[in-house]
Image (spheres, rainbow, N blue to C red):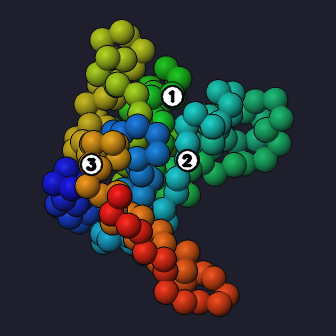
Amino acid sequence: AASMQAVYKLLDKVKESLVTVLVLGESGTGKELVARAIHFEGHRKKGPFVSENCSAIPETLLESTLFGHEPGSFTGATKRQIGLFELANGGTLFLDEVGELTPSCQAKLLRVLEERKVRRLGGGEATPVDVRIIAATHRDLEAMVKEGHFREDLYFRLNVIAVRLPPLRERREDIPLLLERFLEKNAAQRPQGGKPPTLAPE
């Protein structure tokens, strides 16, 4: 589909840069695949690719997961934990469902984007990090900004380049190609091998 060709052209332009990318699309449109393509096709492909779904982490653990913590920083913190920003140093950090971040996490994420340094919970000196950020969401961040649920300054920091992924229902001409690919993949995985079945046009 022409809409996907436009996505591919945009990805080809941004893969070699360090600009922050915001991937927008409904669940199931392939937002993480886009993030992986940007990372593994770009000059950071030898660095780590770290992915995290912000909606899958309990609110009480989110900041510790992203930024790390020092022993004694909260109840149960018995040893140092390195956060995802430090784990992704030299590579890419993909933050899926970034619209689910708490106000506190939003503020700290903005600070990291501005300073390129991360401070662990309970820690003192900030640690420099060289991380490319790719964020994704299925939510309307512009509407969330107007409603006061998402920081406007963070939105502009994340939305340097926006990649919009159209749902399959808007690119139905891609369905035959996808079905052929799935059938080929399935045939290759069968022990007996053989050619994949063909589909009638109807």
Q: Which residue is mark 1?
A: 101
- Point out the tag, 1 or 3, that comes first from the N-terminus: 1
- Point out the tag, 1 or 2, that comes first from the N-terminus: 2
Q: Is residue 131 above or below residue 149?
A: below
Q: Is residue 115 above or below residue 74?
A: below
Q: CA distance from mark 1 to mark 2?
A: 12 Å
Q: Quadrant of the N terminus?
A: bottom left
- Secondary element under disc 3, as helix, strand or loop, is loop
- Drawn side of residue 183 relative to residue 81, left or right: left
The residue drawn where x is 42% and y is 58% is: 33
Q: CA distance from mark 1 to mark 3?
A: 31 Å
Q: Which residue is mark 3?
A: 171
- Drawn side of residue 125 relative to residue 143, left or right: right
The answer, for residue 109, to whether it is visible in the render is no
The reply to whether discs 1 and 3 touch (Cβ–Cβ < 8 Å) is no
- Secondary element under disc 2, as helix, strand or loop, is strand
